[in-house]
Image (tube, rainbow, N blue to C red):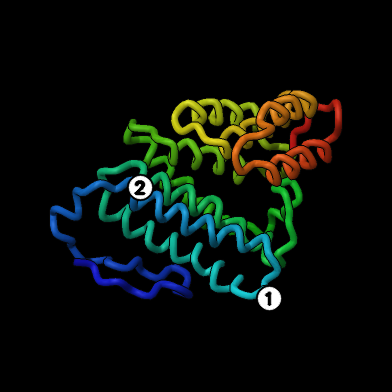
Amino acid sequence: MLRPVRVEGAPEGAEAPGDGLTPPPAQLHGPVDPVLSALRFCFAAGDDAWGEPPDAPGVGERRAHADAAVVLCRTVASLRSDEPEARALLALLLLRHARRDARADGAPRTLAEHDRSLWRHDEIAEGRRILEEALAAGRPGPYLVEAAIEALHDEAPTAADTEWDEILALYDVLATMAPSPRVALERAVARGMAHGVQVGLVALDELTGSPGLDAQLAAARAELLRAGPGETPRA
């Protein structure tokens, strides 16, 4: 069996835990979805911490959880090369994690407010390559669609160049594959960015009362309104 290893604070480019080891066949071919879900949850907890002051209690440790999730996801993607969604999740994490330095001070920022020169473009390039490998398998799943959305954000030289029509089309697919309040919220924002602020605000109003979305709805409305009432924002 693979033994637990400490990955917190692992250096950049470190080999993934378990490299060179072969797990028992029963583990190698077992269900992978629960593992991917756990890694996604671990990463999300760490990713959220990049929007908090770096000197706040526990923030450094939580940020390291995102690094650990990427390292562990490399292992899973390597061991389960038969599962395109394992590679898709790795691509998703890399494409999102590559933007962390633009949030290092902990100030809350939308993507439109990022200094894109701070993004780690080597990680973006790796994420895009892994995404292409997952796409080539011809078995798209929710992680692949999410990774494609992140890739479109990362490929835009400026916020104004973001291909919101394509992002909205991907959210339409994701809403069918894996519907959730979070996906509905992000799809509503994409509608506003692609078709005009008022369209987006109406879509957000339709989500009023959805479980756990109260604070997120307020933030999404503010983001759309900053884009310019009555306009068709491209940022």
- Foreground: 113 or 42? 42
Quarter of the figure that contains the C terminus: top right
Q: CA distance from mark 2 to mark 1?
A: 33 Å
Residue 113 at x, y = what percent?
Answer: 76, 50
Q: Residue at x 79, y 29 (%)?
A: 197
Q: Earlier in the sequence, mark 2 or mark 1?
A: 1
Image-quadrant location for residue 133: top left
Q: Which residue matches tag 1?
A: 55
Marks counted in the figure total: 2
Badge 2 crowding class, 10 Å Cα cut-off, few under 14, some 14 to 19, many 20 or more, is many
Left or right, 83 with reference to 115: left
Q: Secondary structure at mark 1?
A: loop
- Check whether the beta carbons of the residues at disc 2 and disc 1 lie within 8 A of each other: no
The image position of residue 58, as x and y in percent, is 59, 73
Q: Amino acid at mark 2?
A: Ala
From the top left corner, tell me how far across and down residue 189 is, in percent.
68, 34
Residue placed under numbered mark 2 in the picture = 86
Which quarter of the figure is the N terminus placed in? bottom left
Front position among marks 2 and 1 = 1
- Where residue 3 appears, x then y in whole percent? 25, 71
Q: Amino acid at mark 1?
A: Asp
SS label for mark 2: helix
**Quarter assignment of residue 184:** top right
Q: Nearer the viewer, residue 47 or 232?
A: 47
Q: Is residue 2 above or below residue 98?
A: below
Q: Residues within 10 Å of mark 1 (few under 14, many from 20)?
A: few
Q: Is residue 62 left or right of residue 21?
A: right
At 37% from the left and 40% from the top, the residue drawn is: 134
In the rendered image, the vertical position of residue 201 relative to residue 47, given as above or below: above
Q: Nearer the viewer, residue 81 or 54?
A: 54
